[in-house]
Amino acid sequence: MHQKTPEIYSVELSGTKDIVKTDKGDGKEKYRGLKNNCLELKKKNHKEEFQKELHLDDHKLSNRELEEKYGTDIIMVYLGCVLGLVVILTGIFAYYQEAKSTNIMSSFNKMIPQQALVIRDSEKKTIPSEQLVVGDIVEVKGGDQIPADIRVLSSQGCRVDNSSLTGESEPQPRSSEFTHENPLETKNICFYSTTCLEGTVTGMVINTGDRTIIGHIASLASGVGNEKTPIAIEIEHFVHIVAGVAVSIGILFFIIAVSLKYQVLDSIIFLIGIIVANVPEGLLATVTVTLSLTAKRMAKKNCLVKNLEAVETLGSTSIICSDKTGTLTQNRMTVAHLWFDNQIFVADTSEDHSNQVFDQSSRTWASLSKIITLCNRAEFKPGQENVPIMKKAVIGDASETALLKFSEVILGDVMEIRKRNRKVAEIPFNSTNKFQLSIHEMDDPHGKRFLMVMKGAPERILEKCSTIMINGEEHPLDKSTAKTFHTAYMELGGLGERVLGFCHLYLPADEFPETYSFDIDAMNFPTSNLCFVGLLSMIDPPRSTVPDAVTKCRSAGIKVIMVTGDHPITAKAIAKSVGIISANSETVEDIAHRLNIAVEQVNKRDAKAAVVTGMELKDMSSEQLDEILANYQEIVFARTSPQQKLIIVEGCQRQDAVVAVTGDGVNDSPALKKADIGIAMGIAGSDAAKNAADMVLLDDNFASIVTGVEEGRLIFDNLKKTIAYSLTKNIAELCPFLIYIIVGLPLPIGTITILFIDLGTDIIPSIALAYEKAESDIMNRKPRHKNKDRLVNQPLAVYSYLHIGLMQALGAFLVYFTVYAQEGFLPRTLINLRVEWEKDYVNDLKDSYGQEWTRYQREYLEWTGYTAFFVGILVQQIADLIIRKTRRNSIFQQGLFRNKVIWVGITSQIIIGLILSYGLGSVTALSFTMLRAQYWFVAVPHAILIWVYDEVRKLFIRLYPGSWWDKNMYY
Amino acid sequence: MTKNEKKSLNQSLAEWKLFIYNPTTGEFLGRTAKSWGLILLFYLVFYGFLAALFSFTMWVMLQTLNDEVPKYRDQIPSPGLMVFPKPVTALEYTFSRSDPTSYAGYIEDLKKFLKPYTLEEQKNLTVCPDGALFEQKGPVYVACQFPISLLQACSGMNDPDFGYSQGNPCILVKMNRIIGLKPEGVPRIDCVSKNEDIPNVAVYPHNGMIDLKYFPYYGKKLHVSIEKFLCGDYSFGKLEHVLTYHLSGVGYLQPLVAVQVSFAPNNTGKEVTVECKIDGSANLKSQDDRDKFLGRVMFKITARA
């Protein structure tokens, strides 16, 4: 009984605390009263003391004495601080990483303040375009951006580039006539953010800001909710698993501890310890770093990742909805085919045009090339002498540019040729004539005469011709030649190419002398009975790298769908040439055509490919769309609107697919946002598209997506390895607590020490796994299934926790027992020693050899034990790191030294361990001590065992694929 | 909306039920009986192997140890001090002179502690020469007698109440055993009262002297009394081990110092703090910032009427 008395009369706070504890422990009312008494007594005592003298000696006390005097465990305070710091630092770190990648993005938004020329108070003024109001009259000239939605009042040869809005790459003429019900199609409206390419236009502002068409699309885009990325879902899943394990083990042992008569407060401390041991604190930072490392690597390959998590999304992509213009194609009209001498010639459409192999010896070609060169208003912008021809900037529309570059490549200096053949008259192209005509002085030394050259829509040109040039000779144009012309025309048109006809006429010198004055309005020259020379067809050709990339996607199990605003025929032609529709697959229409039956009679199952237009899509129910998406392997959507692109993306997502969408226009931004990963074009892309996208392709090249997919898959695999690596040690950190509670050993590892593993030694190695190369060709397997192939699956958790983790724990315990035994505490002595060991006033605890230890000496030994356990885990984590390099292949197949960063990681691990043990060994709060060098090697046999065991596991997996072992052991 | 949720709740419940036991496939918790059997067999073998391996490595580790002396003694270079009666919570003694039950526990504790020091128990111990280290070469390490009479008033021979009934309580101070420790100089335990007005602290033996003959200590296995030692038979490995274990309490006796605090009648109810320190020996530390018990001990006594 004598033990209670000192408590009651104790003046020390610690005494009070003990009572509070007991109070908590059994919660009996009578102790409450006791406590109150005690407090009153204490107050009285205090008063007496104050009356006597000011008595303060806390400043003389050491931390430890302070702790004891006031009952505050400074270690616990440290722990609290450290945990808080961990949370804050991780948060700051993640924020920093995110912010960094956002910054890269914002550097793209070089928003030039827009100016608009407005007529106000009968004065022309230049004002910032955001100051425009509805009813303002604005003037826009070629090269300017349209400052708002305007209704055209008058225009002079105005053409606008609506590609960012509708996807049409053709410049659209604008005039004041009302031509179409649909505001997007009518000619008398110019849209905000489109560009006026040429001419001038005067119009009245009808909508500004958010109410413009673009504004509508933007609000559509912002209305599309942000979906969680697959990796975010995976990490959440992983967090659930870890939290579930941590909390359930924690609570289980809390209950065990309470039923083992531990105090509730102590049990709560155990609970915290167990949870800290179980949560991989460093993992969030690791994942962020890993992702941003990959993002950096991808940026080098021209994929700029805005949203870090999107790095992995690309890897799990199963459907890519790709835009045509600019992504699959070069976004530049190029001469693809020529027809002359009754023959079709193929022109080189590769990016540099270098390899024109068609027969240029024919005299027809000489005539044709002359027409191409002369009947062309396009010119190179000056001052680009050193720029390669294909990259030179040109003033003129797409077709003329194509012709200019084509002739420049083949004939050399076009401008010089034009100079030698001076233009005397010209009728520019217009939509009623559908031809373009010019008359030139010939530099023929045998006598000056005029050459009239004409190009235009083939059928219009043919109408004007009476002869046709074959092999340089003029032949009368009869029915059979007309038929060959039509066949060629249809064939080229069927390729989705834009065909132009070319003809010429040498004006007789007697009728048209050198001084003859040509009058364009009076048309005082012949425009019929000309000589037809040839056809030339142009297309926006696919990028040369795309077919290969599409094949790679195919073999990687990714479906590539083309979604374009372009014509179905062009879309299909491009799809065929890049392999989106493979060479031997047919659409329903193709089959019908081949079998010469009606489209309705064709069995839809026979067709592998489908071309769906926007008009058809409009009438479809979502079930029908699903059916199309599910049944056809190769799909092309043509003539689609922004809303339809969104519908297509949603349809794909209903198939449980992870959808990547590429796009450049503003019209794409809703779909980009809706997609699991939106990919915008860096060069052609509008800011709206880039903002809505998760990733930007800096070179606008579809092939870059494939690299992205590869990196994304690799990062998923590597994250798996990283997580497996980080999870493993959790068991080794958890077991000490469990053993401590159940068996009563002195605590083998402290909470702070655990944090030093999680946030110190293990960080760099787990990041190093991000540099691991792929084990096999990851582009030859199917994309992972969103709901089945999880990042953290059961075998991963089981193998990490119950196999390697447990082996690690045993190894670490061996080091711990070795240290204690060699200092005098044999393992059997340690059992149930915990209570005596931790009593502060027991200062003569006997060890196995009869020596007596003070509390502090024991505590120091305990810290040595922490350090030993720490070193044990550290040494085995090195083995763990090495085995995690591969999941299936042997380490020796993968190459032990191929990933140098792993070795940096191992070195860092050892160095940090050495610093903690030998450098900071004297800092009390960290509870590290200097460990004898030999203890570093005690766990080495266990580390080797881990390696050997894992090699055996991998060997069996490779030997017996699909077996029980494979199913249970492959993660 | 609520209807939907309810449905999904029912569904998930059904899914769980199916997961726990699926009658069509006979799966219990996602595995069939055969699959469970296989996996349990695997873990039985695997963990059996791990247990064997761990036992083996532990056995190898234990082979590196010496039975008599621990491999390292670097963590206890200098002994701590400890007081008796053994305190229950903090180092505080409170008793009432007039109430024997308030100090009965202390006395009992002291008696228990002094039991090995009785003449009866010590009769097999060796009488060693005073004032010098008693180094032994073995194989027999004998223990020296510690005459309990050295504790004088605190020996319990004359006063079975150890002074508690008179308000002059005895506290015994002992130095921790450390194998191989050889104190230099003339070690003594010096006790002072921290309260200036109560100087009456007496120390026995005279001056708190600790005789060097009790050092060095050779460990509980070697350092035993002769008679008991002869009882043990060293030739039977295991038997010997058990015996020494039992003998441990009656072998080596460590020197004691008693502190007697005399409370004047006017000082009753007042708390007195006494600090004892090792003095006179260069290699026995008594000043350490962190370890308050290294070579020193501080305790509080409150005696009431």
Image (tube, coloured by chain):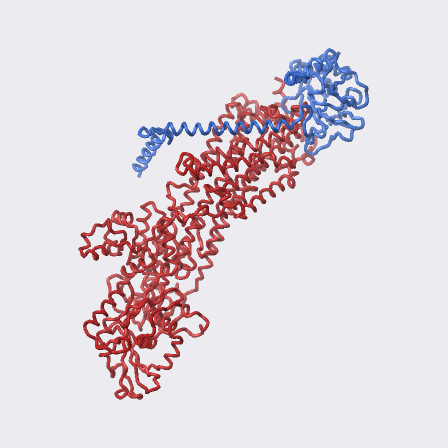
User: Can the viewer see residue A37 in this picture?
Assistant: no
Q: Position of residue A406 (x, y in %)?
A: 36, 71
Tell me the colour chain B is drawn in. Answer: blue
Q: Position of residue A375 (x, y in %)?
A: 32, 76
User: Can the viewer see residue B252 in this picture?
Assistant: yes
**Total number of numbered labels?**
0
Would you place residue A478 above or below residue B123 in this image?
Answer: below
- Foreground pick, A221 / B65: B65
Say which quadrant the C terminus of chain B sits in: top right
Q: Position of residue A905 (x, y in %)?
A: 56, 45
The residue sitting at 39% across, 63% down in the picture is A130
- Foreground pick, A682 / A572: A572
**Apparent side of residue B261 relative to residue A450 in the rendered image (left or right):** right
The residue sitting at 21% across, 69% down in the picture is A483
Which chain did the renderer colour red?
A
Say which quadrant the N terminus of chain B sits in: top left
Would you place residue B249 above or below residue A867 in this image?
Answer: above
Q: State which quadrant residue B246 falls in.
A: top right
**Apparent side of residue A333 relative to residue A249 in the rendered image (left or right):** left
Q: Position of residue B207 (x, y in %)?
A: 80, 23
**Apparent side of residue A412 relative to residue A479 in the rendered image (left or right):** right
**Apparent side of residue A466 relative to residue A546 in the rendered image (left or right):** left
Would you place residue A171 above or below residue A575 in this image?
Answer: below
